[in-house]
Amino acid sequence: LPAEAISNVQVISGGATASWTNATGGIMSSTIKQGSNQFQAGYSLYYTPPTSKLLNPRSRDTYNAIGNYYSYASANNHTDQSTEYFWASGPLLRDRIFYYVLLGDELPSTQRSYGQTQQAVSGTHNRNALVNLTWNITDDQSFNLLAHRDWNKTYTNYYTLQENYNPRSVGDWYAWNGTENASRFLIGNYHWRINDALSLRLMGGYLGSIVSSPSSAYENAEYPYVTSVDPVSQTQTNIGRNNAYEIYSPSDYWRRGYKGDLTWQAGDHKLVFGGEFYKHSLASTTESVPAGWYTYYDQPNVVLPNGSVSPATGKYVSQYVNIEGGSFQTQNTGLYVEDYWQISDRLMLYGALRRDRYTYKDGTGSDFMRLSMTSPRLGFSWDVNGDSTLKVGGSAGKYTIPLPSSFSFGVAEPRTTYTSYYTYTGVDPLTQAPTGLSQIGEPFVSYSGVPSATSIAASDIKAPYQYETSLYVQKQLTPQWSGQLEGGWAELKRVIEDTCYGTGVAAYAQSVGYPGYTQADSSCWLVNPGEDFTLVRDYDGNGQLESLRIPAAALGLPKPEHKYYHLTATLSHASTPEEPYFLNVSYTWARSYGNTNGLIDEERRNGGWIGQTVAFNYPGIMEGSTGDLAGDIRHSLTVSGTYDFRNGLSLGGVFSAHTGAPTSCLGTYPVTSDPAYDSGAASHYCNNLLTHQGGDQRLPFFWELDLSAAYRWHIGSANALSLQLNVQNVTNHKGVVNLEQRYDTGQIDASGEPIVNVNYHAVNFQAPRSTSLVLRYQFQ
């Protein structure tokens, strides 16, 4: 929803009650602006000036080990950007029905970016509309209805560069693509205070978006997508007539749900009984252009993923083909009961129990995974002195980790993906496609066919979860100053991940009476890593499916480990008429250690499909995986504040700083016969030597200063005008936020030596200084 429509936001950083949908890592609860008996209207303009040396400087180039560009950004620029909002609020029926409406429009703007051989010119146009209706049915009943629509369009034209990395050598138009996103949102909320002891809340809603990706790839579908890899710089360049290697059908996502709870004040106990149901759907298909994606290489005697060796001349070409998609749904159901027990005027205890069930369906509508979890929650709040000057509280609980709605799409979609390798004798001058092809070995198949429910996941897979505890102390130091000390601990206990280690399953099956059973290492299925599981397969080869309980030791995958500790100290000053400034100083010490972050792969900077990363695919990938995780930032400091002058001027700023995150050295598994080798530079073997997670180096100390200035005018008694200047990264500090961790290219030569990645340790910098203006006018 547009930020302009948000009235206030509540942030729950941890210890959420059982009424929330088991979100871990934090919750944001937003309240939308509403109307009243007084008519009000206004206009807001968010303006970003064009690229300039002072206000919005260009990004910085970065280079690799041989002096070539790792990131070429110094020529990128944009025109001025403006987003305006018109809003109004007031009564439809005095004292009973109120409205708040908002219309937003992002005016056309242009962004230009450059690569090695292309200029991209992009234009964006966004529009949105929001209506929020509030109906006070009676003094004890209210109904709120919120509707929002958003139309977002981005189109990009591509032009050739006649000289590499020279923005002054723009040539002919080359291709185009675009993204069109139409989203919709509708939610209703009903509250009824039945009597002094009972109250009811009912809520239902729907959200969805249809995203289409038109492009010239449809017009050039008869041409292959052709690229070439420079053997020295290892840069991949598009040299063909097509600008895209895949064609996307419109994707349609929607989610609808219902939630309700009954609150009963029974003496000292406030009891809450609630339930919720959500249904998600995602439909989309992706296909390679019919001729596929050809890539030229000049690498002699390299071991290819299919086990063959490239020719001694080094001249060969790969052809990549991918076809995937379908329609998939998931369902989430939750029930919860809570007890807020006011033991005394100063002490309250909280106890709750939540029961969740998640159902995931494949492309045929059949269930392939059902996950259930019971989650207890405990908490307390103690007003030590009885006057809120000193409070102590804490919480402990078990939290499931819900998989996103896109999860079914990733694991259950029909998909065919393969790469073939060829020598060639010529090149078509029109399409740049290779001619005179002679295949090298068999195609390397990554995915093949339509997965069945039994092939997608272990039949006894269980829901992922973690434990969380927190404890805090709040102290009112003076009427304006307050402090808080808060500590927390979280430990991951179970995850869901895909594994592809069919060799381990086959070896165990053969050892327990199925001597003829084999299973490929390219077929992946879902498990709880480090736990025993049951897999349904045709072990006897007679066409009959059987269940086999397989011990975790057969795969050799470790149990997931992720422990996070933190201690945060906060000092705050509240603004008053006598002392008109707000100040908040927060320091956090934290520690994050283990072998996984959970559902995403932050270590390899490549999330992929959530719950289906390269982690846990093979035992070799997990060797050396235990250590400091990507989120192990030990020390962080944030200082924010504002000062309000009596003449309407307000100055503010935020200073943030933290120590660097750890990085790893990632390389190719050194044994070509092991399936972990096919994962490329994804293991912790660096130059054929085993390292460990987070053991390479830490990023440098990071800091940033953001400032703002605002002035407010009151024009008579009914009008107000304000102008605000915001500047992020005021000093244009060039801090390092990431670096390339892949030591090699994912290939080794015939002698077993990895081919070193020339981009290893190349850096990415923080965003340069950014300046914007906000103009607001309000009438009432």
Image (tube, rainbow, N blue to C red):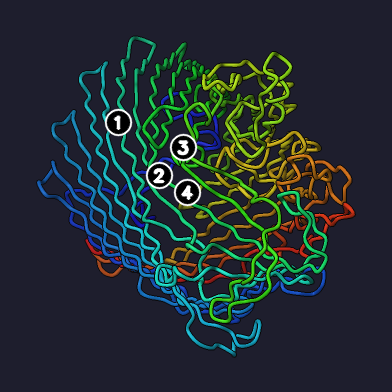
Q: Secondary structure at mark 2?
A: strand
Identify the amino acid type marked 3: Ser
Identify the amino acid type marked 1: Tyr
Give the left or right position of residue 445, taking residue 619 as reference: left
Which numbered disc flags the more N-terminal residue, 3 or 1? 1
Mark 1 against mark 4, which lies toward the viewer? Answer: 4
Horizontal and vertical percent position of residue 33:
30, 49
Q: Secondary structure at mark 4?
A: strand
Asked which quadrant contains residue 87, the reply is: bottom left
Label 1 – label 2 distance at C-alpha: 26 Å
Residue designated by label 4: 324
Asked which quadrant contains residue 439, the reply is: bottom right
Q: Residues within 10 Å of mark 3 (few under 14, many from 20)?
A: many
Label ID, residue 258: 1
Residue at 56% over, 22% down = 538
Label 3 – label 1 distance at C-alpha: 21 Å
Residue designated by label 2: 326
Which numbered disc flags the more N-terminal residue, 1 or 4? 1
Give the left or right position of residue 48, taking residue 333 as reference: right
Q: Residues within 10 Å of mark 2 (few under 14, many from 20)?
A: some
Residue designated by label 3: 408
Identify the amino acid type marked 4: Glu
